[in-house]
Image (spheres, grey):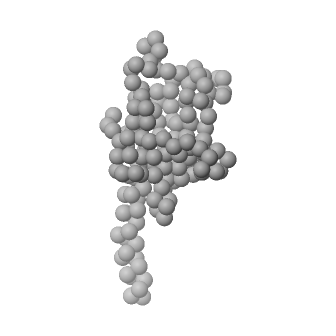
Amino acid sequence: MKKLIILLFLAAYTLPALAQEADKITGVWWNEEKTSKIEIEKKDGKYIGTIVYIIPENYENGEPPKDDENPDESLRNRSILGLQILEGLEYNSKEEEWENGEIYDPKSGNTYDCYAWFENDDLLKLKGFVGGIRWLGRSSEWYRTEL
């Protein structure tokens, strides 16, 4: 009984720390080129990312760029501002990374499996890959910022 009480006590202090570590990914991030900002938030227990800012230099005729590389022709006229490009990331505390996600690249119109990890508190690394093969892909660095 004494061991059970100790285990419950330890769990009560450990679980909030794990949740806090998992939520470290939330916030606003510059993409690698510093042309757009992506806000990562937690939704239904998973992490998603939405483009919330595009530098004005990339606007076309006063409007944000369109999703013109999307493989679905009916979506090519939508703005990439407000577009959710990251979804389904789940925190793996053992590996200290977010995994099982997907990332959409508006430049190519392709969607990739992805995972993410921190180099430091202000540098988030993401890797998009295909066919379930992590080494077959491309990495990107995102930098913490404000909206």
- At which x and y percent is residue 122? 34, 46
- For the question of whether residue 144 can be seen, the reply is yes
Quadrant, the N terminus = bottom left
Residue lying at the far bottom of the rendered structure: 1
Q: Is residue 2 above or below residue 25?
A: below
- For the question of whether residue 44 can be seen, the reply is no
Viewer-proximal residue among 122 and 88: 122
Name the residue rendered at 62%, 27% in the picture: 70
Quadrant, the C terminus = top left
Based on the displayed image, in which of its 4 quarters is residue 143 positioned? top left
Number of marks present in the image shown: 0
Viewer-proximal residue among 117 and 21: 117
Based on the displayed image, in which of its 4 quarters is residue 107 positioned? top right
- At which x and y percent is residue 92? 50, 59
- At which x and y percent is residue 28? 37, 39
Name the residue rendered at 46%, 11% in the picture: 61
- At which x and y percent is residue 124? 42, 46
Name the residue rendered at 53%, 53% in the picture: 99
Name the residue rendered at 67%, 47% in the picture: 131
Q: Is residue 14 above or below residue 2?
A: above
